[in-house]
Image (cartoon, rainbow, N blue to C red):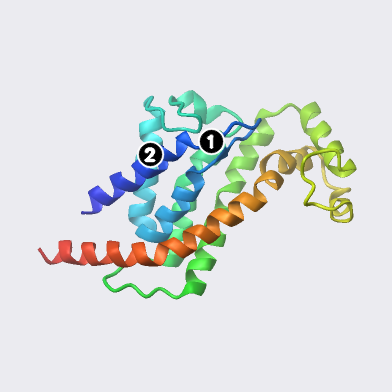
Amino acid sequence: MGITLTSLFAALTAAGAFITIPLYPVAIVLQNFFTLLTGLVLGPLLGGAAMGLFLVAGALGAPVFPGTIGGIVRLFGPGGGFILSYPLEAIAAGLIAGSPRGGDRTPSWRLILAAIVGTVALYPLGLIRLRAVLQPEALGTLAAKFLAGDDNLKFIPLSLRAVFRNMDPSWLGTLTAGVFPFIIGDTIKAVAAVLIAPRLRRVVGDRLDRSDRR
């Protein structure tokens, strides 16, 4: 049953490649929703294994990465660090949510915390890789536009942008490209995952318990 669940959630994450908004340098995808849901539902071991299987399939050429693209070269692009962080996201969320059990009654606060930590775990490696790939001039331009309010991030007021005025332009440009545009979307995905996870955890927990008794 564990192998079946691992394969199923890897396949769900792969299916998320078909729902992509191709922004540059990092696309908006549904895959990180399935990654987070995998960790919340399967726990750290099976969740991490599912995302590991997903990465291996993509690296071997299966068209499972954002935009239905495959191949290991995709992992060295601007968004490669985020893709490589999928197992980290699932494991981090799974460690807090715990592995599912029959009749699972994991408290809501624990799932919320798991979703927050899992979502945050997606970013460090992704931002480091993004900063390494983009040219310093491009990052400086992004930083300048952010501070001037000359971008599409209208939900961030100028008064809040001023807080970042003394930040290294390369890092501010990286945040502008890899974090700020995704705040609202990632929040919605996290809320949806927390709402869906309890029922799935009970179903998965019951099936795993029955499988262990055989």
- Which three-letter amino acid code belongs to the residue tagged 1? Thr
Q: Sequence order check: which comes first, mark 1 or mark 2?
A: 1
Q: Position of residue 35 (x, y in %)?
A: 45, 49
- Give the quarter of the image for residue 126: top right
Q: From the viewer's perspective, is residue 18 above or below residue 38?
A: above
Where residue 3 sits in the image (x, y, percent)? Answer: 24, 48
Which disc is residue 20 wearing?
A: 1
Q: Secondary structure at mark 2?
A: helix
Nearest the viewer among 190 and 61 is 190
Q: Is residue 99 visible?
A: no
* Nearer-the-camera pick, 116 or 56: 116
Question: Is residue 169 depicted above or below 207 in this figure?
Answer: above
Estimate how packed mark 2 is, as few (under 14), some (14 to 19) or many (20 or more) residues with alpha carbons within 10 Å.
many
Query: Circle 2 sits on which residue?
Result: 54
Position of 154 compared to 181: left or right? right
Label number found at residue 127: none
What is the x, y in percent for residue 120?
A: 59, 54
Could you tell whether 169 is left or right of 70 in the image?
Answer: right
The residue depicted at 47 percent of the width and 64 percent of the height is 195
Estimate the x, y position of residue 153 in percent, counting from the top left: 77, 45
Identity of the residue drawn at 38% across and 60% down: 41
